[in-house]
Amino acid sequence: MKKDTEVNLMHGAGGEVMGELLQTLTAFKNNNAGGIGLESLDDGSTFTVGGKTVILTTDSHVVKPIFFPGGDIGRVAVSGTVNDLSVMGARPIALTCAMIIEEGFPIADLEKIVASMDETLGEVGASIITGDTKVVEKGSLDGIVVNTAGVGVIEEGGFLIRDRNLAVGDKIIVSGTLGDHGLAIVSYREGFDLGDQLKSDVAPLWKMIEAAMKAAGNGNIHAMKDPTRGGFAACINEMARKAGVKVVVREDTVPIRESVASAGSLLGIDPLQVANEGKCVMGVAPEAAERVLAALKSHPYGKNAAVIGEVVEGSGVVMQTRIGGERFIEPPLGDPVPRVC
Amino acid sequence: MKSGKIILRGIVQGVGFRPFVYALAQRYEMCGTVINHGSEVEIDAGGENFDEFSREVAKGPKMAVIDSVSVQPLPDWIPPKGFFILKSQDGARTGFVPADIATCENCLHDIMDPNSRYFGYWATSCTDCGPRYSIINSVPYDRERTSMDEFPVCKACLNDYEDPGNRRHHAQTIACTECGPKLSLLKGSGEFVQTADPIAAAAELLDAGNIVAVRGVGGFHICCVEKTAERLKTLLGRPNQSLAVMMKPETIREFVVEPTKDEWDLLKGPVHPIMVLDKLDPESHGSLSSLHNLGIMLPYTGLHHLLFAKLRSPLLVMTSANAPGTPMITETKTIIEKMGRVADVILTHDREIVNRCDDSVVRDGYLIRMSRGFAPLRTRMDLGDRQILGVGPELNANATIYKGGFLITSPHIGNIRNPPTVAYLEETIEKLTSLTGSVPEIIAHDLHPQFLSTRVAQELAERYGATLCPVQHHCAHIASVTTGEVVGIAIDGVGYGDDATIWGGEILAGSPANGYIRTGHLEPVMMPGGDMATKFPERMLYGILPTEETLALLQSRGWNDTALRILSQQTEKRFNTPVTTSTGRVLDAAAALLGICRERTYDGEPSMMLEAYAARGVAQPMEITIESRDGRDVLSTPALLREGMEMMSEGICAEDIAASIQTSLAKGIAELALAGVEKTGIRKAALSGGVAINRQIRETIILTLRESGVSCLTNPRYPLGDGCISCGQVITAGILAKEGRI
Ligand SMILES: [Fe+3]
Ligand SMILES: [Mg+2]
Ligand SMILES: [Zn+2]
Ligand SMILES: [Zn+2]
């Protein structure tokens, strides 16, 4: 395929095409401050201050629409950063918030967004301690862009978790139903009347992940990642590729809400290929899997958690289907773009 | 005495070449030696009748393909006393191995003759027949490099093998009850069943309505008699798919119209393919085929012949043992594991199947599936010095390799969509490269960025340090027919276009060397829900005709309000509605319109069902609307379907409407091609693509072109469908490479 010369929307969709853009955007030589750096393309990065490891991450958020069933851009902005810290095993402590606002944006909406951010922070005991605001001319962006950055630390008894350390034998656990956010946003935005109202799963996961880490015991969660853009499919493929292993998923164990599955089949969209904003995917040492699962289930955000597969030698991600066949789970090219073959 | 060294190149292995030479040497009283180097036979011979001898030798035995013969002088040659066959040696490997050959008349006679020592032996073969490709590990083809190596010959077989006067002189697969592979009967669970005659026991069980898995030449079949067919389809989860059947030649005319002479020759020849033939009564034998035709083959191994000798039923369903879209099962332990719940018993043998090979399928003289007996297919063509691999498309794929003036295409592999089939593609490529001793320098693949075959190509390119060469799907279709300049007509289900939309009804004028110009195509239409629209053709109908009438029709068919609302919203907003010019999708939509097929349960079902209806109908003329857009001619398919819908409301029967839509679509496509002829001045056409398997469409296109004085080429050696793509890819890459453009 021809290499693109200009940025297009596919580049931001979290699919395979985005990887090409990332090569350009991560071409820094100064990319590591003595820890996990930009080169790792992990959920966040680390550096050391006074002998203590600090985790740092950042994320910009544009959501259309700004308010949607189950959440809003503010909740997404805080949860996104909180979750990127959490999936590295770090307690989120402090966040920054930068907003770029289009001229004419309703103040009342800003109030709602801020209140929602505050509520989300409160759930995990983190704070926004600095910020920045820019207002731009009408038409130069669509409504509002919210950027948050956050720092976190590894707690006493906690441990740093990477997205690249899946080990053969690990159980793959997802913390709940997949595809909720992506299909909710799509159907709400496009005005699809699906009968059932779909709700986004956007949520800050630190408390749930903290409980899971405690239950697991030191180091027993080998790898973790949040399946945001590109969905579970992109996430699990990236994890498998980085670790040089194969993941086998059993279709009948993958938690997907009835309403999400039916919306997916009406629209021709695979729930595994669209974003989640309140879920994590982990590879857990087999002996710790039951404990971790129980801990996840005891938390409201993890009550639909399930063991959905395991890690074996090889490469790629394979789904064992209900009818006894096998198919590849492939990262989407874009989101949501049908394969059409 | 005159002497000389005769070198014959070509397919000279596994065809009884050395015994053939030996017999001639005896007849012409020659002395000397013959040796097989893999792809060439070298004869040092001397005698009074040297000229006659060398003339006869150059003809080769029946199954051989001779590419070249050369005769050189033999100075200082000391003739041996007599004529001797020397042991095979490794050599140049362009000749490749022959395909598997159906049991010959002579061997069949031996099997049925109580006085023969091969009487009743299921794996009887000779130099003229028996397994080849399916048992070969490496070349040269000698017993020790096949799975027959496990079975040391007995004394009697050794005598036959060494006896120059014997038909089995140097037959690598020689075997008998004493020394050869043995049959056994198992329960579905794998438990051994004690029986003196496994074949007789299996026949009895089949007649009684049991399902039996039978291990054949290139894989397992699942077999049953007609009355068990419904149960079998239910168990296999293929409720609507037609099943191939096996029967004796004398039974054929009770089921289908008499095959033509050519068809009989093919049915009874070395290949013994499945032949799709029209049923006498289109609606008969519905449990075997819901279509107007039936796929029939004749018994092609000793095992089949013996089974039919014991069977009371006139036919056996013989369908490949595999899950849909995955490779045919070859191993006994796999059949127990995967089909143990379907098969009541398993009739198996202990000869390993080294290379899987499904049955070939032929219809109207065209290949639908190129496999056992046809493949590996070897085609002579000069594409230069570089070695080229074509990995094929995604559906109905095979692989082709080019080396030193020859294209070699593998047997049918399948749909490269799931792990087992990807693995099978990789194995097949491995096999092709090792048998031909090639290292690909150029790897051609489909343009679709997400095809798994494209990924395989990328990985192999890295491993071999080869150059990648993407080839557009429909250009590959046309290139497989001819390297000349033509107006190409590529009509199929799907292919990735160079504008990133989905093509499949294309007029491509040009040649592989100069490239093709897309002078015309079908109307680009929406596929609501992407791939969902191929599974549920009614979505496709709405994508082509997004009107209130269509919604009302779907509602009357039981679509619920939510689904209808979403379908129309999605189409209006163009949300997840990729655009296609596919001919297959138009036929799908027509099948949906007429209520013939609402859900596709196997590849091609809607269009095959449409064809079956059309075969019973009378076509009425329809208006053909072609307009010029961006310099290209566009045939309106919505107009055809709209007219079909009007005919429905006039109460015209589905059969007639199906025939009308098919013929008009075909005429429209021919008009598009003629417009391309007009534009480019190229007065020759070429037709390829899976839709061309449809007889009415193919013949209408060819006839319409002929009426305007334009002849239309097709490729009789490669499948009309995607089985020709890997070949077209290699040809395209080879021509570009020869011109120094890769
Ligand atoms: Fe095709
Ligand atoms: Mg992340
Ligand atoms: Zn024979
Ligand atoms: Zn023997």
Image (cartoon, coloured by chain):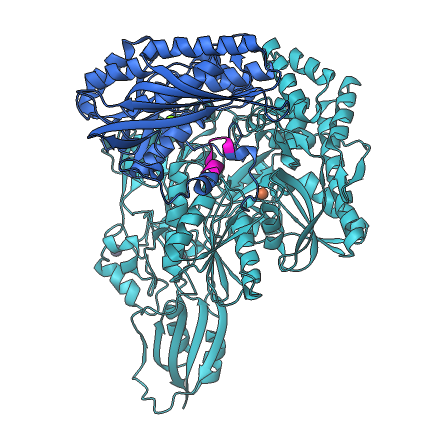
Q: Is residue A302 visible?
A: yes
Please tell me in which quadrant of the rendered image residue A312 appears.
top left
Quadrant of res B283? top right
Q: Residue at x 74, y 29 (%)?
A: B638
Residue B564 left/right relative to A37: right
Q: Main secondary structure of the magenta part?
A: helix
Q: Quadrant of ligand 2?
A: top left
If the image is split into quadrants, where does the N terminus of chain B sit? Answer: bottom left
Task: Check if residue A112 falls in the magenta segment.
Answer: no
Residue bounds of the magenta highlight: A12-19
Q: Is residue A124 above or below residue B326?
A: above
Most foreground residue, B628 or B592: B628
Where residue B417 sits in the image (x, y, percent)?
45, 37
Residue A340 visible in the snapshot: no
Counting the numbered discs, the total is: 0
Kindly identify the residue that appears in the image at 33 percent across and 58 percent down: B138
Left or right, residue B132 beside residue B604: left
Image coordinates for residue B374, horizontal then vertical, percent = 49, 52
> In cyan, which chain?
B
> What shade does chain A have?
blue
User: Residue B422 placed where, x, y %?
Assistant: 40, 41
Q: With respect to residue B224, does A296 lie above or below?
A: above
The percent position of residue A267, horizontal first and vertical second, equals 55, 20
Q: Is residue B676 left or right of residue B167?
A: right
Where on the picture, by quarter, is residue A59? top left
Question: Image point 35% across, 20% down: which residue?
Answer: A83
Question: In the image, what residue occupies the spot 20% across and 21% down?
Answer: A158
Above or below: residue A20 compared with residue A159 = below
